Amino acid sequence: MELKNKTINDDSNAILEQYKLYVEMADKVSERRNNVNTFFIGLHTVLLGIVGVNGFSVQKYWYIIVILGVIMSYVWYYLLQSYKLLNAGKYEVIHEMEQFLPFNMYSYEWEKLRYGEDRAKYWPISHLEKKIPVVFGILYIIFGVYVFIGR
């Protein structure tokens, strides 16, 4: 499948408007990804806050905390990966759309940043972002092992 329809004439205004809309949609995906991060950090804070409340029996319910924490971490990681792949696809389309515009700003910027492969130039935040749910998951497992051994 090709990006540009052969049956449509080269209306530069229509191309520009579609391009602007598509860039906005890519930004919205990034915004949703940020909202997912905020949601899961809040969820983990609540779960860990419950553990810290006086009177909560960690010995009695430790397995629920571990299971919920690991599941939340996995879902968080999966959603981040999904958003990363979705945005990667959107930016590939944006790069192709730029071929029909006077300037290819995103493609040029990505080239200048060496495609995110040179940490000295640019290191995509998604590399760090995906490690946070993994760290949470590992901490829940360590917590579970610690409580289990201490029983």
Image (cartoon, rainbow, N blue to C red):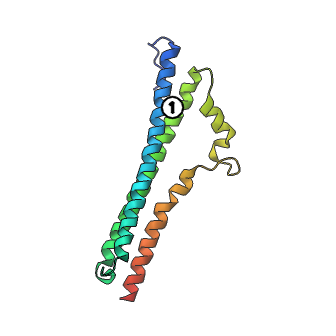
Q: Is residue 62 left or right of residue 108?
A: left
Which residue is at 34% across, 70% downward?
Answer: 67
| Residue at the spot 28% in from the left edge and 82% down from the top edge | 60
Image position of 139 with respect to 97: above or below = below
Q: Is residue 23 left or right of residue 43?
A: right
Outermost residue, bottom direction? 151
Q: Position of residue 79 (x, y in %)?
A: 41, 51
> What is the x, y in percent for residue 120?
71, 51
Q: Quadrant of the N terminus?
A: top left
Task: Give the x, y percent position of residue 29.
Answer: 44, 41
> What amino acid type should be assigned to the residue bearing mark 1?
Val
Q: Is residue 48 visible?
A: yes
Q: Looking at the image, which residue is at 36% across and 66% down?
A: 46
The residue at the point 43 percent across, 67 percent down is 137
The residue tagged with tag 1: helix, strand or loop?
Answer: helix
Q: Is residue 79 above or below residue 115?
A: below
Answer yes or no: is residue 2 visible.
no
Front residue of 58/137: it is 58
Q: Residue furthest right?
A: 120
Q: Which quadrant of the figure contains the C terminus? A: bottom left
Q: Which residue is mark 1?
A: 93
Question: Which of 112 and 5 lies nearest the eye of the viewer?
Answer: 112
| Vertical placement of residue 28 versus 6, above or below | below
